[in-house]
Amino acid sequence: AVVYPGGGPVGQDRSPFVNVDTTTIAGIERAKQMGFADSGLADAVVTPFIYEANELFTPTAKGRLFTVFRHPIDRAISLFYYIQVADWEPSYRPDLQEWTLEQYATSDVAENNWMTRQLTNQLEGDLNDDHLALAMEVIRRKFLVGLMTQIGRTMERFERY
């Protein structure tokens, strides 16, 4: 289904959204069953599940990967403060409001090489230099990369892509 939030004046672009949830594996499977990619209803898919999302696309409706990277320390600090207040998120942790950033960083709560795990599809267990090399190769071969610190240039680049 296509959803038009906000309504608006007649003739105005109402920013349509496609009602599929690509932030879960079940949602990606549902979108695939609905023929999401071939429908042509969306120009972009946002998901942390790059391998599963690959199944959405077909020879006639190909996908391209792009990402915006943020320094991992900046990302970790932001996540620490975010999960303290984001009561709508499954990862919500109000107990962390009593923690220092140092306590969080040295705890088991802090993420463990999240990006490398996502790119190599090695979500559990130990990682080694081979995983890092594979993650870097996936980025090099498959993604158009932008940087959060240069977001203006990044968006211009993505628009040209």
Image (cartoon, rainbow, N blue to C red):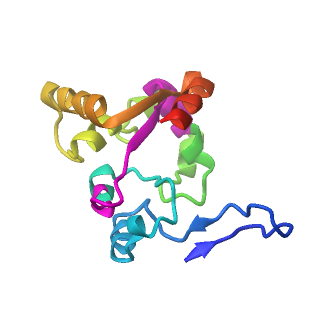
Q: Is residue 153 magenta?
A: no
Is residue 12 depicted above or below 106 in this figure? below
Pinpoint residue 111: horizontal percent, then vertical percent: 37, 39
Is residue 38 depicted above or below 64 in this figure? below
Residue positioned 34% across, 70% down in the render:
32
Pinpoint residue 46: horizontal percent, then vertical percent: 47, 52
148 sits to left or right of 37? right
87 or 8, which lies in front?
A: 8
62 or 73, which lies in front?
A: 62
Outermost residue toward the front? Answer: 60
* Quarter of the rendering occupied by the N terminus: bottom right
Which residue range is magenta in the image?
Answer: 54-80
Is residue 37 depicted above or below 100 in this figure? below
Residue positioned 15% across, 29% down in the render:
128
Pinpoint residue 96: horizontal percent, then vertical percent: 54, 43
Residue positioned 33% across, 70% down in the render:
29
